Image: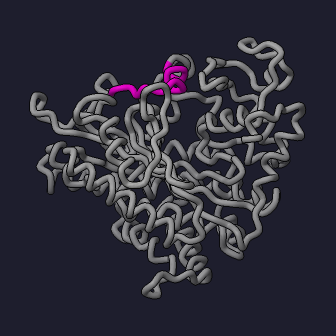
Amino acid sequence: MKKNIDKIEDKEQLINWFKNGFKKKSDWMVGTEHEKFAYTFSQNKNKYIPLTYDGKIGINSFLRELSKFGWDQVYEKKNIIALKNKLQSITLEPGGQIELSGAPLKSLHSTCKETNEHLKLVKDIGKKLDILLVGLGVRPNESLSEVPFMPKARYQIMRKYMPKKGNRGLEMMHSTCTVQANLDFESEQDMINKVRLAVKIQPIVTALFANSPFYEGSNNGFESLRRHIWTDTDSDRCGVLKVALEEDFGFNSYVDFALTVPMYFIVRENKYVDCSGKSFADFLEGKLDAMPGEKPTMGDWEDHLSTIFTEVRLKKFIEVRGADAGNWKRTCALPAFWVGVLYGEDSISLAEKICDKWTQNDIENLSNDVAKKGLDAEINGEKVIGIARYLLEIARNSLTKRNVKDAIGNNESIYLNVLEDILHKKMSPAKELLNNFSKEYNNNMEKLLKGIAY
């Protein structure tokens, strides 16, 4: 494609790349991405263990089975590393997590249908191959040393670099799963409004979807251990998107921020060149050590942006990335919440009323607190559960006004019901899981995994 051969000569091209993402409101889409862990039962160990890449019951076999249902195989060397079907892709995460990157779709009904069809397919194939697919924020029963590494070159580079930047980067890569939504903007100001609000309220979403209370077979003391792991991964590229809270935030300042984030790699002739820790700003000037005199392409820029791991991330659309993976209903609820809050006529201004005075320190502290306390966390004396109720009401009213109906007349607000239930019970998914672990599953992790599997 042309983007991969056009050399970047100046910063203005990078700014214009984002502007090329502008879409009229009538053309706004929503995309959903969700990861899940894959397990098989080991008779020798008498427990569920993560799938290796090779083997009779392995990731390779699983992807091959999936490809029989209209998916094209994507190879790196001799290994299948992904599947493609039009605008959808199934990708392989570092520890064998399976991710669906959904197509951009016009309605929540469509994206939820896509999710349901995918989860049904992987469940059916899992049953055939004796594979269990599970939606949790963190692996509940195994240590990092028990997780097999997947054979993708970019991950080999990241594995070498991550431990230099934090103590838990390898756990983030191999032992966490998330669900995210992708949303459009029509102008730079629209992007600013959406990103800034999303950064402020992301901790509330983290609390609502908190679903990682177990690690290495026991209660880990967090409701979202996944979120906590990110705090010790790589401060250069993770956590709260601070630049969005600055007064002059826009494409220019985001480009400046992205240029400061150290690189991982570039791809030349289908080979990954290790550039870890080097500066994209130097690359822009032809001063990259690994490729002296070489200027980056737009393909290099897109690759680089994909290595920024903030909870809200900007591309030609907005990615909201701070929720633990969960069950079918919550996977549909995540994009519903964000569409309701960010796409409504007056929903952004209504939501801003509750958080317009929050400082960067407030938001960072809250983000850390919800990992531990979930809906019981507080910001400026106000409980997260109350803020969540207010935001959910905004989202519901917004989706009701959108009035996009399915075949039997339901509008899109039906996907928020599972979140209403969480608030009614005053119990996050993590708390409910802890409760069920003792009462329903007799403190048996194998029973729990089987019980919550798709």
Would you say residue 157 sits in the magenta stretch?
Answer: yes
Residue 254 location, quadrant: top right
In the displayed structure, 107 sits above or below 324; it is below
Residue 229 or residue 112, whichever sits in front: 112
Residue 3 in percent (x, y) is at 76, 40
Residue 406 or residue 200, whichever sits in front: 406
Residue 372 visible somewhere in the drawing: no
Number of numbered discs overlaid on the protein picture: 0
Q: In the image, 439: left or right of 131?
A: left
Would you say residue 42 sits in the magenta stretch?
Answer: no
The residue positioned 76% from the left and 26% from the top of the image is 280
Magenta stretch in the rendered image:
148-159
Q: In the image, 429: left or right of 205?
A: left
In the displayed structure, 447 sits above or below 168; it is below
Q: In the image, 288: left or right of 30?
A: right
Q: In the image, 276: left or right of 293?
A: left
The residue positioned 36% from the left and 48% from the top of the image is 66
Residue 452 in percent (x, y) is at 25, 54
